[in-house]
Amino acid sequence: MKDIIIVGAGLAGSVHAILMAKKGYNVKVFERRPDLRNVELKGGRSINLALSTRGLKALEPAGVKEEIESICIPMYGRKMHDIKGNLTFQSYGKEDEAINSVSRGDLNKRLLLNATEYKNVSFFFNHKCEDIDLKTNTAHFIDEHNNRVSHTADYIFGTDGAFSAVRLRMMKTDRFDFSQTYLGHGYKEILLPANEDGTHKLEKNALHIWPRGQYMLIALPNFDGSYTCTLFFPYEGEPSFNSLQTPEAVNDFFKSTFPDFYELMPDLADEYFKNPTASLVTVKCNPWNHGNKTLIMGDAAHAIVPFYGQGMNASFEDCSVFYEMLEANDDDMEKTIVEFAAKRKPDGDAIAQLALDNYIEMRDLVADESFLLRKKIENKIYEKHPEKWMPLYSQVTFSHIPYSVAYETGQKQKRIMDKIMSQPDIKEKWDSQEVEQQILNALDH
Amino acid sequence: MKDIIIVGAGLAGSVHAILMAKKGYNVKVFERRPDLRNVELKGGRSINLALSTRGLKALEPAGVKEEIESICIPMYGRKMHDIKGNLTFQSYGKEDEAINSVSRGDLNKRLLLNATEYKNVSFFFNHKCEDIDLKTNTAHFIDEHNNRVSHTADYIFGTDGAFSAVRLRMMKTDRFDFSQTYLGHGYKEILLPANEDGTHKLEKNALHIWPRGQYMLIALPNFDGSYTCTLFFPYEGEPSFNSLQTPEAVNDFFKSTFPDFYELMPDLADEYFKNPTASLVTVKCNPWNHGNKTLIMGDAAHAIVPFYGQGMNASFEDCSVFYEMLEANDDDMEKTIVEFAAKRKPDGDAIAQLALDNYIEMRDLVADESFLLRKKIENKIYEKHPEKWMPLYSQVTFSHIPYSVAYETGQKQKRIMDKIMSQPDIKEKWDSQEVEQQILNALDH
């Protein structure tokens, strides 16, 4: 059987390793960081992600879906906290539809342990990829003893993240389009601890948002009762990371801006200054393949901002789409590498744009009355005519509709709803037969 | 006096070296390629560029303007060749305004020789920049003996072109925006030799264009009577570089598409297959500085496609803008590095967009009747009201108006002219008082 090198044992790399092992390939996985399998992970302190329908689908053929679901906390909707501490709840989808809070570290560790079960998978940790020879399909690494080691394989997959070394080599080939674009906003994590009895200080089964127009705070539940909270905030201006330089400034800002959070949170300023400020990047490139032997997947091909909760899900979906395509192509790997790169690229672009758009929605629109009415109308149509109208959020989060199709449908829906909402008496008549008919008519055009 | 490292002894690097030497800095210039000063350049065989007003301005303080003008052939306008061989001439500007055909190699060599005159400039050829340490301002090179050598300076300037090593290091720092975007079209050079008596086969003082809608051929005159011609052509489709695979296909295509050129050109297919097909890239990034010690300039900061003839001119203008800014800042280098990067970036973006837009104009619109009428109207207004209306081409090519301002003015002019041209009887009344007044009124809004 043929040899595969996977560069990067993160989330996408681990799942891809399992799926390729199931296909019988000899899989070598190289990872820059130490072996996560031996690390005792501290609950709560890690980054949280929201696993949803697309991500779960890839875990099924990988045989890990149930295990991973057991470490997830379902969140059935957004709980909005206004400046007075008033709460509003907005479901993400239908009654049983949820996105799942999961610790990145725990998830990665369990995927790696599952991959270890396959005899035809071997791991090389503390191996930093230095370069790839695209002609010979050889990957060069620096190992933990600072030695240079090289491995050659039939196929190389780069799942080495937003700053991919595999992609960096591809970037130096002719006609490779590439962009990395940072937001003017960054983020900082803040851990809201559990109550003394280990219970949660906020409603457990929700994603909490403190939308404040130009910025926001969010909170995702952890199993130990804590919440991983994240402040998304401008780097410059007033207020911004730059303007909050003292404990007093931080406390004053949180007290007046997120008062209910401030009351719950001990040692806020300490936590604020202890944690780094991190940046938010969107990476796009084309093509994702080099010939029919090398392919980048996951963040290496399409790093996106986190506002749709789709970064990991998009990466996992890469794995399941690739796996299904390989099956459909009767295990013709070379054909699949080329076909996947071409077919999946528009979906990467679409989710990148959707994620950027959703920052505006999360930090601003969710607190807007007209926006909430719009959602109410959409949900009504969805309930009555599910075959004609699935809200964009549901398409992205709870379906397997390709992102690029969801994006186009969402654009069409937006045009229709903009017109519906522009009617001066929409507040009064939103629930009427007339409005419903207007929407159905518009859909037929 | 302080030390400066300049990475890249191309066009921008040479001029910047001279200007910084004049300012009294100790300048070390490192170049990947061999010493161009010792190379006997073959006339005609090299790439041609069009030096215009912005470029010439930088050569003045560098003390090389007259020398460089002596190796230029002025081109006063475009000479369009239609498919039947009919010729049309379109002036670039006012009577004495021209762009200047010059050999890239000759120009670079003379700039280097001039820089050599300064005792405080030293050159290091065959030095490939491997990396930059942005903290210590140290540049690492591999020299001709394959040795690793390092040099530290107070300031480092990266003028190392579209694939800049200095920029590659900056790209790995946080919040550095970068994009490289290739056109789906490439180019191939074809040398049209002189007549046997050394005279030119086409009119000498013009830039020749064979516009053919989706693609074009252009020709720039050389001193030895030859022309450097360039086919700008799609990579794929019909016709394309990919579709012309045999001498017969090339000959048939040129014979039917560029018949008058085909008649003049000996051994066309040989020349076609001998020369490589090259790609066309636009590079954008932000910021151009790293702190107040490191700056990229020229193509390293803003590589653009060649369709406005502004790549070199924009790079030279970087040098003169930087030089003037340094003077205005009383030789405060650190302030100037930061100020230049912020102020000049929008101009880089503007000329990148203008250059992309101009491909459409050159290959398609210049053969369009309505487009020519539009230009005629614009020129009339320019002549009668030069203080109110300077055509975009003149702003870009024959003025020092910042590119970003020219771009905005051009957008406004386009909106006005779109409206003027949409009048059904414009062909009849274009020269009327009425149309003139319409334009003047629109300008006041």
Image (cartoon, coloured by chain):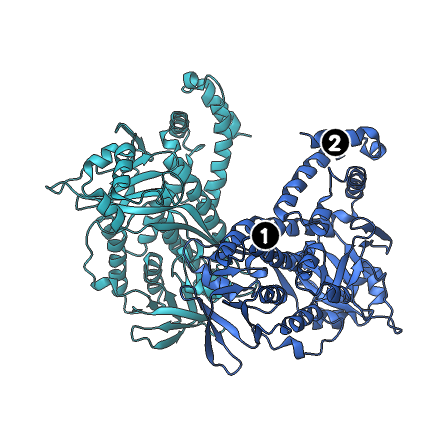
Chain colours: A blue, B cyan
Of all residues, the one furthest to the left in this rendering is B197
Residue bearing mark 1: A348
Viewer-proximal residue among A192 and B249:
B249
Asked if residue B146 is positioned above or below residue B367 in the image, the reply reads below
Asked if residue B269 is positioned above or below residue B5 in the image, the reply reads above
- Left or right, A158 with respect to B83, comes to right
- Location of residue A282 in the rendering, given as x and y in whole percent from the top left corner: 59, 56
Q: Earlier in the sequence, mark 2 or mark 1?
A: 1
Which quadrant of the figure has residue A410? top right
Residue B403 showing in the rendered view: yes
Q: What amino acid is found at the position of numbered circle 1 in the picture?
A: Gly
Which quadrant of the figure has residue A406? top right
Local secondary structure at mark 1? helix
- Left or right, A285 with respect to A351, comes to left
Q: Residue at x 70, y 32 (%)?
A: A443
Q: What amino acid is found at the position of numbered circle 2 in the picture?
A: Leu
- Location of residue B332 in the rendering, given as x and y in whole percent from the top left corner: 46, 64
Viewer-proximal residue among A265 and B342:
A265
- Left or right, B397 with respect to B107, comes to right
Residue bearing mark 2: A440
